[in-house]
């Protein structure tokens, strides 16, 4: 099913959806754009936010369970996540969700992740405005979304084309049919034009295919990369696929066991209680990060661990040339 | 129930193995049949402090679940500060354990330092089913005599027909046994080719494995139990990555040919 929504009707659609679900959308906060719970703020589809919407599937901090001491023993309580509609997720991030689904779906199945994942409706936005650091088309992760979405938005001059990709998506389109208009063939032509324009922009950039990156990994000088790296972990916190986490307790005698995002770039990540650290130097840690994305995740899941969203490039404090792996001197 | 919710277990006994190591016996308070294999581990929770991986020290052939805990950090301190009757959390068993179905009948077990705790499970498993195994030898090295674990059990193992060699790095006048590295003990055993189970610091694992390969052991018959920082215990959190493997899910026991280059 495919419909057309005029630009001025978007808030109306969202507030109708907001009655049933929590709507998450890219909204303007100060001079920046970020994914946040929508409560009427203006939507901003211009920029791809620095923190990816996978944040709402694997939050920075989530409660695994609460423990309550009760006559010498403990009672555990779980917290049920709310249903969400994530609007404006770009194809790169949708591909990242596919990788996370595989990682958390392999035995043993991570129930907590899938409780969030199952209750999330993904309304993807075809990418017509790639950021300066993007290279998704070289890794086959964008700019056009083919499958895996519930709803697919394409921004046009006067409104949005909305396609359904699942039964949930179809139901939403049918339920709110009074807001939509019929699709004219000029709209479809405009969609194709916008996407091919985005593809052109991306393809004109230096080729960063998997083979090229793998070749660079083989010959990289990890030690000088490590000397250059500030070990801030920024690249891992913005990466939509990075999913390392820590488990910690808060509160005595009653409290919460939390799952918090962690970063393999931080020096204490692999340090054991006795003080032995298998990945002591920053170089070893960066090497592990790259090999995880381009070798280990593909070996374990069959999908590439990088979607070319370019966030790690734009966030890097040391301005490392992350993909040619050359260190500025 | 979420996989991250632990079972509750009551501490029913605490033995002091060395100045900083206790052997803790547990009774699981949940109505389940807790089955495990030698070489597996559990995630132990002290509520309010967190969770850490501790290898199972008892053999599945015996009734009581035992964990050997050494004071090393925040959570192990918390476990050791517990008293008999206190409740802790147990999640698991995690990991693969020693692949007894593919291991040969003749087995050499080599442990260094606190790494010997996980091997005690295997030794007692073999002792309890002695007829299923051939020649079995145990080589164990610790820093000093005071750091040796399970001293009261060596005699029983020898009586069951297991060769036992013990060595310390630093001897004193009270120590009448061997002084030196675990590798020197291996020369003493007249063990025919078979499988090996090793746990200890990487440098010791490499030395022992090299020595065994010189004696004709195949590198795929040498099984090493590796130690890594772990958080989730189910292969998701990436703390314990060793190359493409997760030590908590694909390990902690690996055949030496898989991890030789990664140690």
Image (cartoon, rainbow, N blue to C red):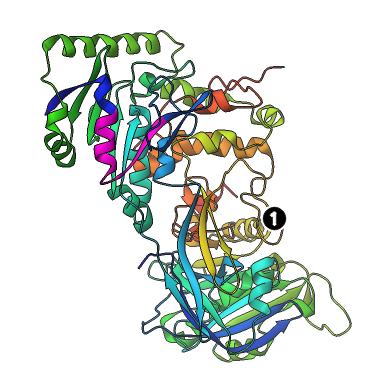
Residue B238 located left or right of residue B20: left
Task: Magenta stretch: give its range.
Answer: A11-26
* Residue at image location 67% in from the left, 51% down from the top: A277
* Residue at image location 57% in from the left, 66% down from the top: B52
Q: Residue B67, how many percent across, how many down?
A: 57, 78
* Residue at image location 34% in from the left, 50% down from the top: A116
In reply to whether residue A49 is colored magenta, the answer given is no
Q: Kindly identify which chain the residue marked by label 1 belongs to.
A: A
Quadrant where the N terminus of chain B lies?
bottom left
Quarter of image, res A149: top left
- Up the image or down, A299 lies above or below B149; here it is above
Dot 1 surroundings within 10 Å: few (below 14), some, or many (20 or more)? Answer: some
| Residue nearest the observer in this picture, A1 or B35 | A1
Instruction: Give the labeled residue for mark 1.
Output: A276
* Residue at image location 55% in from the left, 52% down from the top: B239
Quarter of image, res A18: top left
């Amino acid at each position: 099913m495919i419909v057309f929504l005029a630009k001025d009707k978007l808030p109306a659609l969202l507030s109708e959806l907001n009655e049933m679900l929590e709507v998450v959308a890219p909204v303007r906060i100060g001079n920046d754009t970020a994914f946040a719970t929508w409560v009427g703020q203006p939507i901003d589809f211009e920029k791809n936010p620095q923190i990816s919407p996978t944040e709402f599937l694997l939050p920075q901090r989530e409660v695994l369970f609460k423990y309550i001491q009760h006559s010498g023993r403990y009672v555990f309580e779980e917290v049920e996540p709310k249903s969400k509609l994530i609007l404006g997720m770009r194809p790169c991030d949708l591909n990242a969700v596919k990788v996370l689904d595989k990682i958390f779906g392999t035995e043993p199945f991570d129930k907590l992740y899938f409780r969030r994942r199952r209750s999330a409706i993904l309304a993807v936005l075809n990418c017509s405005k790639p950021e300066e650091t993007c290279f998704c088309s070289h890794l086959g992760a964008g700019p056009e979304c083919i499958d895996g979405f519930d709803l697919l938005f394409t921004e046009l001059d006067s409104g949005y084309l909305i396609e359904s990709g699942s039964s949930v998506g179809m139901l939403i389109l049918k339920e709110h049919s009074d807001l939509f208009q019929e699709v004219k063939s000029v709209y479809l032509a405009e969609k194709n034009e916008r996407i091919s324009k985005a593809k052109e922009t991306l393809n004109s950039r230096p080729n960063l295919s998997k083979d090229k990156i793998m070749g660079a990994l083989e010959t990289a000088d990890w030690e000088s990369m490590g000397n250059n790296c500030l070990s801030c972990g920024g690249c891992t916190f913005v990466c939509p696929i990075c999913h390392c986490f820590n488990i910690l307790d808060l509160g005595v005698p009653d409290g919460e066991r939390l799952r918090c995002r962690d970063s393999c770039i931080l020096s204490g990540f692999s340090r054991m209680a006795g003080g032995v650290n298998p990945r002591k130097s920053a170089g070893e840690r960066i090497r592990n990060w790259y090999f995880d994305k381009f070798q280990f995740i593909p070996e374990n899941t069959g999908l590439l661990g990088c979607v070319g969203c370019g966030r790690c490039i734009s966030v890097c404090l040391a301005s490392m040339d992350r993909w040619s792996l050359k260190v500025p001197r | 129930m979420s996989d991250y919710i632990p079972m509750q277990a009551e501490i029913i006994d605490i033995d002091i193995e060395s100045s900083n190591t206790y052997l803790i016996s547990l009774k699981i308070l949940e109505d389940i049949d807790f089955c495990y294999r030698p070489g597996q581990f559990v995630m132990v929770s002290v509520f309010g402090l967190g969770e850490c991986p501790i290898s199972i020290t008892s053999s599945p052939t015996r009734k009581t679940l035992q964990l050997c805990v050494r004071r090393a950090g925040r959570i192990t301190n918390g476990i050791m500060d517990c008293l008999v009757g206190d409740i802790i959390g147990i999640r698991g068993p995690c990991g693969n354990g020693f692949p007894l179905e593919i291991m040969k009948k003749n087995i050499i077990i080599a442990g260094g330092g606190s790494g010997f705790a996980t091997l005690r499970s295997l030794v007692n498993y073999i002792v309890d089913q002695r007829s299923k195994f051939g020649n079995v030898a145990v080589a164990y090295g610790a820093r000093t005599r005071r750091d040796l674990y399970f001293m009261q059990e060596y005699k029983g193992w020898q009586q069951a027909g297991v060769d036992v060699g013990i060595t310390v790095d630093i001897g004193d006048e009270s120590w009448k046994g061997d002084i030196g590295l675990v590798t020197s003990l291996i020369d003493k055993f007249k063990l025919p080719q078979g499988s090996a189970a090793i746990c200890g610091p990487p440098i010791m694992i490499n030395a022992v494995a090299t020595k065994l390969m010189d004696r004709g052991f195949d590198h795929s018959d040498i099984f090493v139990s590796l130690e890594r920082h772990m958080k989730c215990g189910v292969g998701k959190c990436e703390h314990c990555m060793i190359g493409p493997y997760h030590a908590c899910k694909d390990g902690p026991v690996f055949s030496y040919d898989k991890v030789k280059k990664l140690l």
